[in-house]
Amino acid sequence: MMNEKMSNRPFDLLNDSLGKEVLVVMKGSTQVRGKLKAFDIHMNIVLENASQIVDGQLKTNYGKIMVRGDSIVMISP
Amino acid sequence: MMNEKMSNRPFDLLNDSLGKEVLVVMKGSTQVRGKLKAFDIHMNIVLENASQIVDGQLKTNYGKIMVRGDSIVMISP
Amino acid sequence: MMNEKMSNRPFDLLNDSLGKEVLVVMKGSTQVRGKLKAFDIHMNIVLENASQIVDGQLKTNYGKIMVRGDSIVMISP
Amino acid sequence: MMNEKMSNRPFDLLNDSLGKEVLVVMKGSTQVRGKLKAFDIHMNIVLENASQIVDGQLKTNYGKIMVRGDSIVMISP
Amino acid sequence: MMNEKMSNRPFDLLNDSLGKEVLVVMKGSTQVRGKLKAFDIHMNIVLENASQIVDGQLKTNYGKIMVRGDSIVMISP
Amino acid sequence: MMNEKMSNRPFDLLNDSLGKEVLVVMKGSTQVRGKLKAFDIHMNIVLENASQIVDGQLKTNYGKIMVRGDSIVMISP
Amino acid sequence: MMNEKMSNRPFDLLNDSLGKEVLVVMKGSTQVRGKLKAFDIHMNIVLENASQIVDGQLKTNYGKIMVRGDSIVMISP
């Protein structure tokens, strides 16, 4: 169904971002920022040195955090 | 179940839009605009040079962004 | 499980509507009207010359638009 | 897992209602009434001569309408 | 994974309730009461001589009604 | 994927609680307390001598009640 | 689809956290803290010596609690 232009798949962006900082926009008005350590096909991810931002305010720091894929709206490297 | 008139499938529109600017209407009152770089069968997409618009106001620019398919309502080239 | 009266299946209505104008009622108070160009088994659809109506007010025109099936409540030819 | 008392399955009620008027209670405060023309295992249905009622007020008439199963709460013949 | 104590499975309660009156608590503040005529593995059910109660007030009587499983929170015989 | 430390699986807690009183926290502000009689892999459960608590107030007693797994947030023995 | 950098999978973080205290951020404004005793591939988890925090206020203590995976947003060791 997909042609060659598809060689660039969405999860490639996550793969290329491993070890780098990403911004994760979540359902509700929460964002989490941290270094991407792991992800799986459900878009479950692990961030290191993560900080959670709610309504633009830094709320919590986490050493490591696992975020459930179905709570995620967007991920930007 | 589908006849020949179906040769035109919904994902063909995304395939034809690769490399072009698209508008993505998301759940809530958020829209994202950018160049479509990748998509998969879950409608997860990657946009380049993306800008997020909330309630009609430009909110954030992103170099690259992955948007989860289940947050998407409509995509227009 | 289904008897002969089922020969008339729901997706037949979409198939018969290809190339014709349909009204799409979506979750929230949004409606989209346009010519049905494509659909798949997830009820993802493509409309051409589409106009979006929010709370009864014309909001936006789209040349072509893909609408995700799981945002759709009703489709009427 | 099911014994003989199950010979009466929920979808039998829809099958018996083909060609007859049904009331469809949907998520939100919407009801649709019309003649049941078709249904599938996802509970997607097609109604003919349908009228939509919102908060007890007749809102719209439709010649034919397809209603997505996952928007449906109850169906009564 | 399950030991003998599991011989008593949740759907056994529905099976034992066939032909008897049950109370169905639904999402939102709606309850439906009626004689259980049928159910399937999705917890779709059919009630006979059903009455719908919203916020504690009797709202509607139905001869027969099919209730979608995914709108159901609790069922009590 | 799982090592030996996983021998203790979440559903073991339900299995060990069969015949004992459990507290079930549900979506919304509802709790149900009763003796756990049955459960399945969808976390559908049956409680006996159950009482429903809404916003901290005892609301209803049920001889037996089946609770749909997808309405459940937490279960504590 | 995944390269070697993926050897670090999200569920590894849960596996490494077995027997240690974790913070579980749930849908709504609820958090639960306790010692992680078990988890499965649906992210259902069991916590021991758990305390539930709602809007920043300690609300309830539980000896043991099973939390449904689909109510979970984030887990941090």
Image (cartoon, coloured by chain):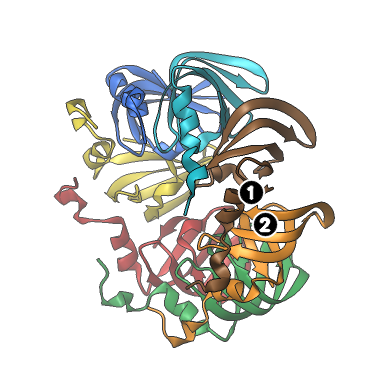
Chain colours: A cyan, B brown, C orange, D green, E red, F yellow, G blue
Amino acid type indicated by mark 1: Val
Task: Tell me: C56 left or right of E77.
Answer: right
Amino acid type indicated by mark 2: Met
Which chain is home to disc 1? Answer: B
Q: Identify the residue at horizontal 58%, vertical 85% (top origin).
A: D20
Crowding around mark 2 (Cα neighbors within 10 Å: few <14, some 14 to 19, many 20+) is many
Say if D16 sits above or below A10 in the image.
below
Say if C30 sits above or below D61 in the image.
above
**Label 1 element class:** strand
Looking at the rendered image, the quarter that the N terminus of chain C falls into is bottom left
Say if C44 sits above or below D6 in the image.
above
Residue assigned mark 2: C26
2 and 1 marks in contact (CB < 8 Å): yes
Task: Tell me: C67 left or right of B59.
Answer: left
Residue sitting nearer the eye, E13 or B28: B28
Residue assigned mark 1: B73
Image position, residue F63 (x, y; %): 36, 55
Residue sitting nearer the eye, E64 or E41: E41
**Label 2 element class:** strand
Image position, residue A11 (x, y; %): 46, 35
Q: Identify the residue at horizontal 62%, vertical 15% (top origin).
A: A58
**In front of the other: label 2 or label 1?**
1
Question: Is residue G47 visible from the viewing direction of this image?
Answer: no
